Amino acid sequence: MLLRHTAKEIADREALVVNPAKTCQPIGAMYASLGIHKCFPHSHGSQGCCAYHRSALSRHYKEPVIAGTSSFTEGSSVFGGQANLLEAINNIFTIYDPEVIAVHTTCLSETIGDDVPQIVNKAREEGKVPKGKYVIHVNTPSYVGSHITGFSGMVKSMVAYFAENSGKKQKQVNIIPGFVEPSDMRELKRICSEMGIKTVVFPDTSGVLDSPQTGRYQLYPKGGVTVKTLKTIGDSMGTIALGQLASGPAAKALDAKCKVKYEILGLPIGLNATDRFIDALRKMAGVSVPESIDEERGQLIDILTDMHQYFFNKKVALFGDPDHLVSLVEFLSDIGMKPVHIVTGTPGAKFETRVREILKDKVPDVNVRAAGDVFLLHQWIKNAPVDLLIGNTYGKYIARDEDIPFLRMGFPVFDRIGHSYFPTLGYKGAMRLAERILNAFLDRQDRDAPEESFELVM
Amino acid sequence: MPENKHRSAPIDTAGVKEELLKSYPAKVARKRAKQIVVNDLAGGESPEINANVRTIPGIITQRGCTYAGCKGVVLGPTRDILNITHGPVGCGFYSWLTRRNQTRPGSADEENFMMYCFTTDMQEEEIVFGGEKKLRKAVQEAYDIFKPKAIGIFSTCPVGLIGDDVHSVARDMKEKLGINVFGFSCEGYKGVSQSAGHHIANNQLFKHVIGLDDTKSKAKFRINMLGEYNIGGDAFVIEELLEKCGIGLVATFSGNSTYDKFANSHIADLNCVMCHRSINYVADMMEEKYGIPWIKVNFIGAEATAKSLKKIAEYFDDKGLSEKVAEAVSAGMAEVKAVREDVRSRCEGKTAMLFVGGSRAHHYQELFREIGMKTVSAGYEFAHRDDYEGRKVLPTIKVDADSRNIEELKVEKDPGKFRARKSEEELKKLSGRGFEWKDYNGMMPDMESGALIIDDISHHETERMIEIYKPDVFCAGIKEKYIIQKMGIPCKQLHSYDYGGPYAGFKGAVNFYREIDRMVNNGIWKFIKSPWQANTCLVGKFASED
C-alpha cells in the first residue's frame, strides 16, 4: 500500500494538515498574471517560492512558465525587500521588456511588511519604469486563503489598475472565468462568439499556456488579454463572474469602480450551471441563443439519457477547489450520482453550506469539509467506500490503494495531458466530463466482469 | 530549428560571453561576467569562477531555496522520518513527492511516509501570535496518529522571522514522546540557493542521528554512499552492484534510506561521495569524529562506475574483493559495450549542454562522452567554486554575508567511537598508488579547454546559448524544459530524468545511451514545419478558371 499509514479510525486534528487539498496564494496570482498579454509575473519573496510555482505550473501545463523573483536573502529579510524589488523592476524591464510586471507578495515579504505600491512608486520616481509600462501588484500572504484566493486577488488587481470609464459604453460583456484551464477560457470565448457576443475574458491564459510547437520560442506568446482591452472593461455592458470565490471579488470591484453591473454565477460545469450561464449571457447581451448552442445542449442531454444507467446511484468522493466542486456536485447529482465525500482545502464556511443545500434531498448525510485535507477524505472513503474518485493527481495514491476508478480533475494534474486542450466548461465540456466518467466506469466493468457477462455492446 | 547544422569553425567563446552580457544593465553584466568563464586550462590550472553568490533580483533563475535543499533534497528520500513542514501550506505542498526519489520498504508494514505531506498550514493568527503552540500540537498529533520513530521539523521563511524556536519545540517533544525529534532552521531566505539547505540538513543529521546505533555489521567491507538520492531508481542499481561485489552498504545518504541506517552509518569503514556539493559536509565531519576516510566516486557513466568500484576494492586491499569487482566490471562492461557502439554510431559528433544541479552537470558528461557526444558548455545551478575548480581552492574561498550565517559545526574525535581505519603506513601506501583522499577535482579539468562555463545560468543566457550553439540536446530541469523544447531542441531533465531512468551503473548507462539516442535521432522534431511552411511558393490561379 502506498498510503499504508492511513487508518480507518478518524482522530480529531487541530494543528496537523496531512496531504493538503490546497496550495498557497502566490501560485494563483502567478497563474492569473500569465493571462495578461506581455505580462511578467514577479514573486516578491525568496527564490524558492518562484521556483516552486514555476515548477508546479510547468508540470501541470507542460509549457514554459516564466517569472521573476526578488531573491530575498537573510539581509533583505531583516532590512526589507525594497532594494531587491527596485533592482528587479529595473532588470526585468531592461532584459525582458514586458508591458506589465505583475508583482505578488509571499509570506516572507508580508511578514516583514513590505509596502509594494510605495516601492513601485519609488521605482517610478527613479525612472525604472519605462513610460507606458505598468507595474501592478497584489498582496498574497501564503498564510491566508489558498491558490484560489490568490488568483482572485490578482484578477481584482487587474480591475484596480486597469479598468477605466471612458464615458462611452462598449457593446461588450466581461467574463471573468475563474481559476480554470486555458482550454476552458478558449471555450468560453467560442461560446460567446457562437452567440455573437463581443466579450473580454480576463484573465485569459489561452494562447499562453497551450501554445503550439513552432520551433520558435516566444517569451511572450501571442495569447492573453491585452492591457488595451483591459482598459475597456469599465465601459462594458456588464460582467459575468464565474465562480463566487475566484471571480466574485473582481466583478464587485469593477462595479464599485466603474459601475458595471455584474452577475456572479457558478462555474458552468455540467448542464444546469451551463444553462444558467447561457441564460445570463443572453439576457445581459440582449441576444437570442443560436441553434448551434441548442444543438450542443441537445447532444449533451442525448449522452446523459442514453447512458443514464451507468451513472445512476454511483457514489463519488471528490476533492478540489470550491468553485469547481460546487458546480460539479450539482452536475453529478443531476445525473443520478451520489457525491458522498467532498473536501476542499480552501477555507470558507459557505462552501459546506452550499454543498449541503445542493445535496439536501439526494445525499442528506453528505460528508463535506472546507479547510479539510485529502487524508481525511481517504479516511471517509475507508469508512464508506465509493465507486469513483475525482480530484487532482495526488488522488492516484488513494485510487490505487483502494482500487477505485479515478478521474483527474483540478489543479494540479501532473501525470496526464488533455486539460490544457479539452475544456470541462460549457455543454461540450460537460460532454467530455460525462465521457470520461463513463470510460472510468466502463473500463472498470470490463476489467472486473466475469467472462460470461463480458459485454461487447454497452 | 529542427535541422541541426554543425559548425565547422570553432565558436569564439570570448565573443559569445560578450554577446550574453550585452543586453544586461551594467551592474548585472559586471556580476555575471565573473560567473561566465572561458575554460582556459592552458596553465594547467582551472580558471577562477564566481559561484555560490546571490542571484540578481529580477533575473529568471533556475535556483530554488534553502528549504528545498534541506527538506526536498537531503531529507526527502528517507522514508521513515515523518517530516513536518512548519509554515504556510505552499512549501509542504510543492515538496510533496515532486522530487521523484524512489524508496523500497523491506516489507508491507514497514514504515513509509514518502507519499504523505505533513504541514502545520500556518494561518495569519500564528504569524501574529507565534506558531510554536500549533507546531507542538502538530508533532503530538503526528505521533498519536502515525507513531513514527523520528520526526523532522522544517522551517519556512516566516518561522524565522516571527521567531518560532523549532529546536526548543523539538527538544521538548523528544523528551515527552520518547522518540527522536529534531528541527531544521532551513528558512528559504538563508543562503543563496538550495545549497545552504544541504549544509543545514547535513549538520542536523550529524548532530541528531548519525552515530546513535553501534550495532555491528557482519559485512566484511562496509561503506556508506553519500550524495545519492535514488532518482529514477539509481540507488537500486548501485545497491545491486555493490551486493554483487560483496561490498556491504551500511547507509546511503539518502536514496532509499531509513533512519536506522543513518544512525548506524558510523560503523562503515569508507565513505563514498557521489554528489560532492550536497553532502561533503557529512563526509568531512564523519572523518573527523569517527575516523572514516572519504573518497569521491561516481556511478554515472560505465567507465566511471568501473573506476569507482575498483577504487573501493583498492581501498580495502583484499584479493577476493578485487576479483569480484573485476568480475562485476567485466560483466557490466560487456552489457554496456554492444549498446554503446550501436548508439555511438548515430550520436558521434553531436553536442550537449548541461546546466543543472551541483554535480550532475559534471557527472553526466561522462555518459555523453561514452557515446561520442561533446559537452560544449556546462555549469551548475547551485554549486560552489570547489565543484568547478576542485577542492584545492577551498582555502581561498571567501566567506561572505550569505555563507557566514550557515552554522559550521565544531567536530572533535569521539573518544569512544573514533577508530582509525587505516594505519599511517597503509595510507601512505595507497597514496603512493595515486589514491586521492577526500578530493574532488571539479568539473573544469574534465571539460575541453575553451568551453564556456556558466554558473547559475539565466533564462536569457540559456536562450542565447541555444541560438548560438544549436546543441543537439540540452540538460536542465522542469522550469527550463519546455522553454528549450519550444526552441526545437530536446531537453533532458537531469533532476527527474523525465520520469525515466535509472541512469546509474552499467544498467543505467545503457538506459541513458538509448534515451539520448531517442532524443537526438528521432524524427519527431522534423514535423514542426508544415508542408506549406516548408515550401512557401505562392499558389494562384487565373480568374477565368472559376
Image (tube, coloured by chain):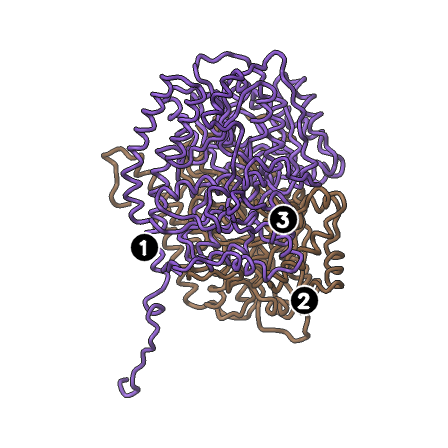
Disc 3 residue crowd, few under 14, some 14–19, many 20+, Cα 10 Å: many
The residue to which callout 3 is attached is B55
The residue to which callout 2 is attached is A130
Chain under numbered label 1: B
Q: Nearer the observer, disc 3 or disc 2?
A: 3
Residues under labels 1 and 2: Cα distance? 45 Å
The amino acid beneath tag 1 is: Gly
Disc 1 residue crowd, few under 14, some 14–19, many 20+, Cα 10 Å: few
Question: Residue B523 — which label?
Answer: 1
Chain under numbered label 2: A
Query: Residue B487: x, y in percent?
Result: 44, 58
Instruction: Identify the colour of chain B in the image.
Output: purple
Q: Is residue B360 above or below residue A303?
A: above
Number of residue marks: 3
Q: Where the C terminus of chain B falls, by quadrant?
A: bottom left
Instruction: Decide which of tag 1 and tag 3 comes sooner along the chain.
Output: 3
Residues under labels 1 and 3: Cα distance? 38 Å
